[in-house]
Amino acid sequence: MVWQPTPYTLPLLVAAFASFAFAAYAVWNRARGDRRLVWSFVAVTVASGLWSLAYAAQLSAATLAGSLLWNRFVWIGAAALTVAWPAFVFAYVDWTAWFRPARIAVLGLVPATVVGAVLLAGPDPIFYQSPSLADANGYRVVEFLPTPALGAFIAYTYAVNLGTFGVLGYAALANDGLFRRQAALLLIAGVAPMAAGVAGIAGLLGPRFVDHTPVTFAATSGILGWVVFRYRLLDLSPIALETVFANLSDGVVVVDDDGRVVDLNTPARRLFPSAAVGSDVETAFERAPAIAELVSAGDDRTANEPNRAPGSGMENDLRVTVGDGSDSWFLTVAAHPISTAGAGVGFGTQSDEEAVAESDGTVLLFRDITERETLQRRYRALIEKSPNVIAVCGTDGLLRYVSPSIERLLGHSPVAIEGRPVIDLVHPDDRPAAQRAFERAFETGEPETLDHRIVHADGSWRRFETVVECLFDDTEELVITATDVTESRRYEQRLQVLNRVLRHDLKNDTNVIAGYADLLRDHVDDEGEEYLDVIDRKVGTLTHLSDQAREIDVALHSDDARAEIDLSVLVERLCESLTSSFPESTVTVSTPGEAVVRADELLESAIRNVLENAVVHNDRDQPIVEVSVDRADEGYRVAVADNGPGIPPIERSVFSEARETALEHASGLGLWLVHWIVAESGGRVDIHTREPTGTLVSMWLPAGDGAATPTEPNGAEATASPSR
């Protein structure tokens, strides 16, 4: 292809390069921004770049065929720009309704038709009649007779452009500062190419057949770059400001220098129903007069201290309560001076001195801290009403805070205690251990627990269990939580004494009674034998009671030691032992091949108690006990059924309510022992009455980690005929 130099080639290439560079910048750096704005901007720059590049090739082609070939791409760029430019303007002003597929299709119908016709038939003869090359000041350009289709398309593009110019003009007039300059420069960037094109057609800028529209892109690309980089086109737009303003969760009120509200968003209206555009601050904030005073104070400080700048302490912060009682909000209010002569609402490009000198009003920012304030009050109340003493101590060992509960528990005033060494209140014998605990907590950051005595205001000593731990990772303070255990320790000591009497002294005395009863058997007649039998039975009952007390003590003071236990093996063994001990009873057993549970190691004692109760408290001549182990839920259930008189309702109610009273008490400790052991195993116990007589005790226990899939039960029956 033969080429020719023209005075327009270089400007067109510059315009094409600049347009493609802007497109690449937007895609690479702003792809996560407002997608409509960014991608419509990319479409504008790519379309204008294609138009400029193709037109540079058309003008530089020295043959008619070459010029018409490149002219096809010119029409593609021009048609694409006819859609991209209005889409960009609509995105800029957030006319989201125009981004619906149907409207975009309508907007692109004419340009798409033009592109299709040019690609299929070429611009000649659709737009050009009798095209030819003619000399124009030393280079050759395509001359032609315009067709009606060309005139119609030019009219369409001018109409679309005029509409977008009206939109940008309104945006420039409706905004201030930065956003006004943005819209105005975009308007210039849009009007200049169209004006140059009209002037070229009129022959005012050179040869009539040279389209000066893409030539102007070299200049408008500079304007576009200025808007993008200097005024952050892809970061800020007027509609972005409006959207942020409207959708802020915090309230915003703009007040002019006359003390009147000029704008406010929805959260502010909700907080202050009396606030409206045009109202004075006294009326707007009648529910919180301190806010009106804050605005007035800001105006006075601006007038009296003209050299003081925003950000240097002039902004005022305030905490206010709006409303009464439960229907109230806690707010923080920040007041900032604004200047419409500068970079718009906010803090723009002016110097601090200029911003203060030209301050035209105040922006009030309201942050709702009701939830935070409520939580703080709740935590404060929890600390103040806590049954424990809560204190904060620094690395110097001095108390920096003590909760009011110290006065109730120890009789000391918090004010009198704060500032004193924390170790002062500790018993002299306990101070070394307490001091070491405090030091370890500071060094390791781990909680430390200590048992010590603290002096009461009356001079007595109270015993406390105290936990000392770091308040925060980044502070050198310890939080101290001290629990008064004086009474619980006394109660524990009394229980230990009673337990010793029940387990040791009572059993020793019953053994003595049993021994003397045996000695008396050789010295009494047959009538006396009957009384000695009664003594033997009571001695046996008391001995059994002492043994159960020992087992309960072990169960309650165990370290929650659990083991994998096969119920099938355990239950069968205990039933064999029951049959041996009570040969007059009939015991039947049904268990699966394996039933592994994870339970307390004392589970054997619990099941033995249930089995023995089923026989011992049975009033039938031949006690019958039916025992089964079955899979249930995610564990196994041991069911023990008997034909005895049943457990009295009062016994079951006392057991289920887990309480003892003077009038309602369990006749033995067996059920309590069963309940505690099964509960420690993570299981549960259920007791039901059978019809016509009898009791069903069901114990459910969670399956162990290695529990196998349940197999068919093994029927095992152990029976013994009555023989005495």
Image (spheres, helix red, strand yellow):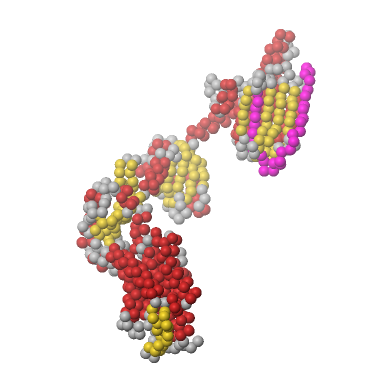
Instruction: Tell me the quarter of the picture where residue 264 sits.
Output: bottom left
Q: In this view, does 95 lie above or below 623?
A: below
Residue 669 horizontal/vertical position (percent): 62, 26
Could you say where residue 374 lies in the image, as x and y percent from the top left?
Answer: 38, 45
Q: Position of residue 135 (x, y in %)?
A: 39, 89
* Picture residue at 56% right of the left edge, 28% below the top: 658
701 part of magenta stretch = yes
Image-based side of 241 in relation to 551, left or right: left
With 326 as the anchor, is 612 left or right in this view?
A: right
How many numbered marks, from 0 up? 0
Residue 560 can be seen in this image: yes
Indicate the quadrant where residue 474 lies. bottom left
158 horizontally vs 122: left or right? left
Where is the C terminus found, in terms of image quarters? top right
Foreground residue among 683 and 257: 257
Q: Nearer the viewer, residue 594 or 340?
A: 340
Q: Return the x and y of residue 407 as percentages of the image width and height.
A: 39, 38
Residue pictured at 23% horizontal, 52% vertical: 279
Give the answer, above or below, for where 576 lies relative to 93: above
Q: Which of 715 and 510 is in front in this view?
A: 715
Q: Residue at x 39, y 69 (%)?
A: 85
- Residue 427 visible at all: no
**Span colored in magenta:** 695-724
Q: Which residue: 65% across, 29% down?
A: 698
Query: Vertically, is 516 above or below 237?
Result: above
Is residue 459 magenta-colored?
no
